Image (cartoon, rainbow, N blue to C red):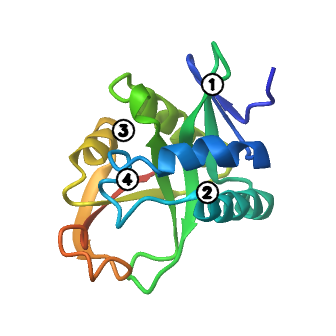
Amino acid sequence: MRNYLIETERLGLRDWTLDDIAPMAKINLSKNVMRYFPGTQDENATADFVQRMIALYNDKGYCFFATELLATSEFIGFIGLSYFDLDLDFCPCVEIGWRLDEKHWGKGYATEGARATLDFGFNNLGLKKITSIASSINTPSIHVMQKLGMKYVKEFDHPKLLEFKKLKTCVLYEKTNY
């Protein structure tokens, strides 16, 4: 049995290991999974991501957590928190996000894991505000934000997506714990 940092009825969220690179790379190489991003990510880019998540967890006590099904220990992607800091008026901030293998879409896993992650962020980490960002065309993620009770704040052009016309306009949602 794994040592999960967050458990829900069906999911276990944990820190990353190097063994997670290959299954996460498979998810990151899916054009369907990555359709709201500039492109897919190969194993090298995924390895860099995993290393960043390990460092973030060691530094802050949170990251986009590796996520597994409790019943089978199958790796299905990530759900968690990340530190976000760009030259934007709402930064720095803590962002909640998720990316799951498409065979696990439509089962409520993103909402279930994100709801537990919000609880972890507010009650275990003492955060006062958690944000979420998505391209305005990413209606599935926006729907999850809304189901979590996050509130729409604004639309903005993401500085790292300016050359991607259909992706550059993003929405900011947030949830507070005041």
Residue at the image point whose x is 67% and y is 59% from the top: 47
Residue named by callout 3? 148
Q: Are marks 2 and 1 in contact (CB under 8 Å)?
A: no
Under mark 4, the amino acid is Met
Q: Circle 1 sits on which residue?
A: 74
Q: Earlier in the sequence, mark 2 or mark 1?
A: 2
- Residue identified by numbered label 2: 43
> In the image, 162: left or right of 7?
left
Q: CA distance from mark 2 to mark 3?
A: 31 Å
- Looking at the rendering, which quadrant does residue 161 occupy? bottom left
Q: Which residue is mark 4?
A: 34
Dot 2: element: helix
Whether residue 120 is visible here, answered yes or no, is yes
Vertical arrangement, residue 24 with respect to residue 85, above or below: above
The x and y percentages for residue 132 are 40, 56
Number of numbered discs overlaid on the protein picture = 4
Location of the N terminus (image quadrant): top right
Tag 3 or tag 2, which sits nearer the N-term?
A: 2
In the image, residue 15 lies at what x, y percent? 74, 45
